[in-house]
Amino acid sequence: QMAANQGNGQAQYHLAECFAAGAGVPVDPVRAYQWMIIAKASLDAKDPTSSLVAARLKSLEGQMSPAQTKQAKQAAAEWLQSHGAVKQ
């Protein structure tokens, strides 16, 4: 999580997957989606993980309510803004 908080896109993707699968943390689709959005903003479009992130975003969104999706997007936007990575 430290690397994810420091802006490492790969770490952000892996943290999102941990929240999606409950690997070492409770399953939390909202936090998984939040970290996927953050990873998408951090990764270069040419990075192979970028296409995985896009696919997982669609998959996670299909498992969430509109309210959960909104909550995750808001949390991601706040994180990105507070870390100087405003990108939507």
Image (tube, helix red, strand yellow):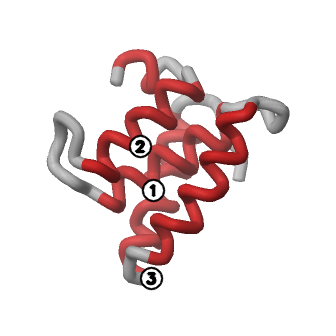
x and y percent of residue 21 in the render?
Answer: 29, 49
Compared to residue 79, the image places residue 65 above or below, namely: below
For residue 24, side relative to residue 39 (left or right): left
Give residue 3's quadrant in the image: top left
Q: Identify the mark nearer the N-term, 2 or 1.
A: 2
Q: Identify the mark nearer the N-term, 3 or 2.
A: 2
The circle on residue 33 is: 1
> Which residue is tagged 3?
66
Label 1–label 3 contact, CB within 8 A: no
Give residue 64's quadrant in the image: bottom left
x and y percent of residue 22 in the render?
Answer: 22, 47
The circle on residue 51 is: none
Crowd class of label 3 (few under 14; some 14 to 19; many from 20; radius 10 Å): few
x and y percent of residue 78 in the render?
Answer: 49, 48
For residue 85, side relative to residue 37 (left or right): right
Image point 76% across, 30% down: which residue?
47
Label 2–label 1 contact, CB within 8 A: yes
For residue 64, side relative to residue 44 (left or right): left
Image point 45% across, 25% down: which residue?
4
Compared to residue 11, the image places residue 22 above or below, namely: below
Give residue 84's quadrant in the image: top right
* Cα–Cα gap, marks 2 and 1: 7 Å
Image point 48% across, 77% down: which residue?
62
* Residue type at numbered disc 3: Pro
* Residue type at numbered disc 1: Tyr
For residue 64, side relative to residue 52 (left or right): left
